[in-house]
Image: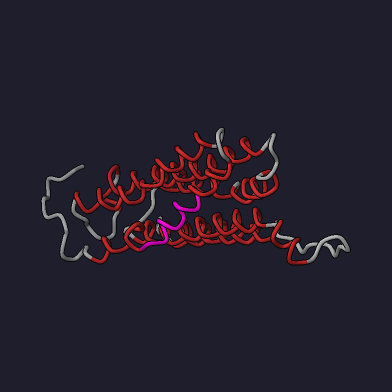
Amino acid sequence: MGTNRLEAFSDGVLAVAITLLVLDITVPKPSSRYTLAHELAMNWPHYAAYATSFITIGIIWINHHLMVNRLQRANHTVLVLNLLLLLSIGVLPFATSLMAAYLKQPNDQHLAAAVYSGSFLVMSIAFGAMNSYILIGEHELLAVKLAREQRRRILTRNLAGLGPYALATALAALSAYLTLAICGAVALFYALPLASGANADTDADTDTDTDVGDTE
């Protein structure tokens, strides 16, 4: 099948997920004890978690577009892998709300941080699995034939977040704040054009694989 319906459905899920994030940011209730500035400052975990998740989902949307745009058609496996990716993205608003609510709670902040970074880790694994299948497993699905090394470079860039997310999840037991900082740093890293693999796509016409026998 073509990729138009796959991308349209994915865009819808991503749009809903990224919109749900802002619903967790509420207006502080008027108080005679604290000023509005104080109340806003105390709500910083919600802002930090929101910004991190928003940027991450936004970057996933960009990279998902690049990944699907490389395809000339999608088979059943691509559709299933895409559903698993969307499943992992759909839970991010919950994980973000959990992180924001429990970040300053001494007894539960570590578990909340582990769930938060773990959700990003699962999403990264799902995206990597789909991209690996497209670029390495079934690269004949590609609309433009890319050289083997070029496909590997794109995949390496896309998988760069796996290590930091795994580290963030492991460190959640020590510091929830450090976990949030690592997730934020990964989001900023993927905001860079180099990390998305977009530059590699622009070289497709000059770096194509002419080896007809390449089946990797």
User: Does residue 50 appear to the left or right of 212 in the view shown?
Assistant: right
How is colour applied across the structure in the image?
Answer: secondary structure
Q: Give x and y (percent) for residue 209.
A: 15, 54
Residue sitting nearer the eye, 35 or 19? 35
User: Does residue 215 appear to the left or right of 54 in the view shown?
Assistant: left
The range drawn in magenta is 183-192
In which quadrant will I find the N terminus?
bottom left
Q: Is residue 184 magenta?
A: yes
Reply above or below: 173 against 180: above
- Which image quarter: residue 214? top left
Residue sitting nearer the eye, 84 or 177? 177
User: Does residue 6 appear to the left or right of 102 in the view shown?
Assistant: left
Q: Give x and y (percent) for residue 146.
A: 22, 56
Count of numbered marks: 0
Task: Work out which residue is located at the far right of the displayed protein and give it.
Answer: 32
Q: Give x and y (percent) for residue 79.
A: 45, 48
Residue sitting nearer the eye, 182 or 80? 182
Q: Give x and y (percent) for residue 153.
A: 25, 51
Q: Residue at x 65, y 53 (%)?
A: 45
Q: Residue at x 77, y 64 (%)?
A: 27
Q: Residue at x 32, y 58 (%)?
A: 197
